[in-house]
Structure formats: C-alpha cells, structure tokens
Amino acid sequence: MVNSLDKAIKEYISKFGEDSLFELINKKEQEIEGLELTIIANAGIHPLQSCHQRGEIYIASRGNIDFSSHEAAHNEIRKILILVAEKLKSKPWRKVYLVPFGPAVISMCIKSLVYKILNQETVDVLHVGNGVHYDIYFELRNIAAYSAYGGVENNESNSTF
C-alpha cells in the first residue's frame, strides 16, 4: 500500500506540481474542520435569523405536517427522519446546530438521530423572546455520570458539563 500511495503522490506531483498537492490537502483539511450543519426542524412559521444560519442549512420539514391520524403522523415524521439521517451521513459534520421550530417530537427525534449517527450532541438554539437566542450545549453523558454523585444538591459548583 505504501508503495502504491507513494507512486500516486509522485505521479500527481509530476503532473500538477507540489503546490497543487498542498492546495488540495489544505482544501480538504478546511472542509473537514469547518463542516457545520444547521438543521431547522420545521421552517415556514418563524423567521430565520443569522443565528439560525451557520454552516450548511438543512430544512427538515416545512409548514404544516399531516397529523390527522396516528398513522399519518407516524409516517410523516418517519419520512422527515429518513431524510435527516441521509443528510447526517452525507458528510463528516463537525458541529450540528438544531433549531427546534415546529412540533417538539420532530426536534427530539432529530437530536437523537444526530447522537446515534454522528456520536455527538447538538447545539440547540433556544429562543428566549424579543429576537434573543442562546446556544445551549450539554454533554449529556457527563450529566448522566454527574447524577450518580448526588447531582446538584451535593455538587452545585461543578460546571464541567
């Protein structure tokens, strides 16, 4: 493998030059380091502000969703989640922002999908009113472990999560 890789590198350099190889490597590194995704759970009702538009924007659903029956709701949400899963698998996302507009169950399922597929927590965009939004991030594994030590009552000063 080393010989074939070495040969391919030498051939590339002979055709395009060392500078081209360095540019290609740097471009790929920047792509991987900077891959951020913002998922809008449901668009169309709330205005999208700049805090909702970081990295690549993906709109999971738009407008009204058919919740006319249990089966309809299940099928609609399932379709949305399959498309979100495909998006999550499309690139090596470094950070995922979740804007939880629309039905809570969609945002909850998207958050779970991000964790299951990418093994990372989402940064959740919390709307607190008057155009103010906060990024909320928790390492939930740390919270689960923290609870084993008496939780907030015994460890109020611990803010490592």
Image (tube, rainbow, N blue to C red):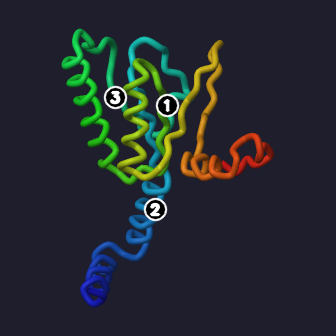
Query: Considering only order in the chain, which callout, 3 or 2, is on the residue closer to the N terminus?
Result: 2
Nearer-N-terminus badge (3/1) = 1
Identify the amino acid type marked 1. Answer: Gln
User: Which residue is at the front of the view, 43 or 108?
Assistant: 108
Q: In the image, what residue occupies the spot 36% across and 75% down?
A: 17
Measured along the vertical axis of the image, is residue 141 above or below residue 113? below
Q: 86 above or below 75? A: below
CB atoms at circles 2 and 3 under 8 Å apart? no
**Residue 7: percent from left, percent from top:** 27, 86
Give the residue number, with chain letter if any, for mark 1.
53
Identify the disc placed on residue 94. Answer: none
Q: Secondary structure at mark 1?
A: loop
Q: Which residue is mark 2?
A: 29
Q: Nearer the viewer, mark 3 or mark 1?
A: 3
Inspect the image, locate mark 3, and give the three-letter code of the amino acid beneath it: Ala
* Residue lying farthest to the right in this orientation: 157
